[in-house]
Image (tube, rainbow, N blue to C red):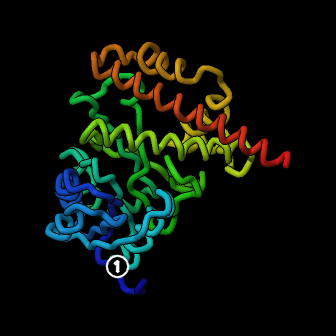
Amino acid sequence: MTNEKPTSQIAGYVITKNEEQNIQRCLTSLLKVTKHIVVLDSESTDTTIQLAQSLGAQCIVNKFENYAAQRNVAIEKTKEIFNPDYIITIDADEWLTDDLVADLNCRIKANALYEYDIYLVHLQILFDNKTLKWGGFQKTWLPRVFRTDIATYGTRVVNEHISISPKVSVQKLKGLLINDDVVSWEDHIAKHNKYSSLEAKERLNLFLGSESKINIKTAIKLPHLRRRFLRQHIWDRLPAKPALRFIQIYIVGLGILDGKAGFHRAIFEAWQEMCTDLKFQKLKELNNKSSLQ
């Protein structure tokens, strides 16, 4: 990294792997906020890199290890190339709405980004061709804009999150970040089956005490970590989690009001919870056998 003044208050990164159907939409929205973008690609075999380069992104190929490691490499490359004060990150299957772009650009123009360390964006999920307005999904806020000097991801290999101090200042941004990750159901199911395998390993790490737990003070201070706090301290200890997950989304969270899409999402989340739970139980059995030998 140079010691020169940053070329921009903010630069962005996107991690990719065979995202040719999404990358143009993603980068087109990100370019409305910053022209300084790194695409860290995990050896795509389609036209992802060519499409990203055509839009002016700096493309770097890096062999995939896990999601946290990939994001940390992306952060370092973004700092190395653009030396920004803040980083914005979105996934390839996401895009910024005009309201979110306007809020960010207003803060950038007025040098007002510096008022806070981290900015949370409101995630809106599209599923089965419908915006999910119920089921708890409408309450998701994610830290996607943050100061470069506090930006590093923890050791979690899936559902990764930024490791930050409770002392940082946090603000919510106006507008929405739209997520639409269903290109084909075959790919979607395969991807989330993979996620369940990774999550089962993380659940085993938590069970064995090798993953640090979020304490209640941190959860109160940082709203985006409250769900993880509840999962670590309560959810993972409950029986019949797949059934409870369906009830949580479809009944308690009123996912029924989202119609067919709400039902499908509740079933899908319950299925993924079942896959994770079964794989975790098997991993725990194997670990117990290994410790007895």
Residue that carries the numbered disc 1 in the rendered image: 81
- Residue 114 x %, y %: 40, 62
Residue 258 lies in what quarter of the image?
top left
Q: Nearer the viewer, residue 78 or 119?
A: 78
Drawn side of residue 96 relative to residue 283, left or right? left
Q: Nearer the viewer, residue 76 or 118?
A: 76
Quarter containing the N terminus: bottom left
Note whether 1 is above or below 8 in the view shown: below
Name the kind of residue labelled 1 in the image.
Ile
Q: In the displayed orientation, state which residue is furthest to the bottom.
A: 3
> Which residue corresponds to the image point at 56% horizontal and 56% vertical from the top-left?
163
SS for dot 1: helix
- Residue 218 x %, y %: 62, 45
> Which residue corresponds to the image point at 24% horizontal and 42% vertical from the top-left?
183
Note whether 278 is above or below 263 in the view shown: below
Is residue 162 in view? yes
Residue 186 lies in what quarter of the image?
top left
> Which residue corresponds to the image point at 60% horizontal and 40% vertical from the top-left?
219
Is residue 151 in view? no
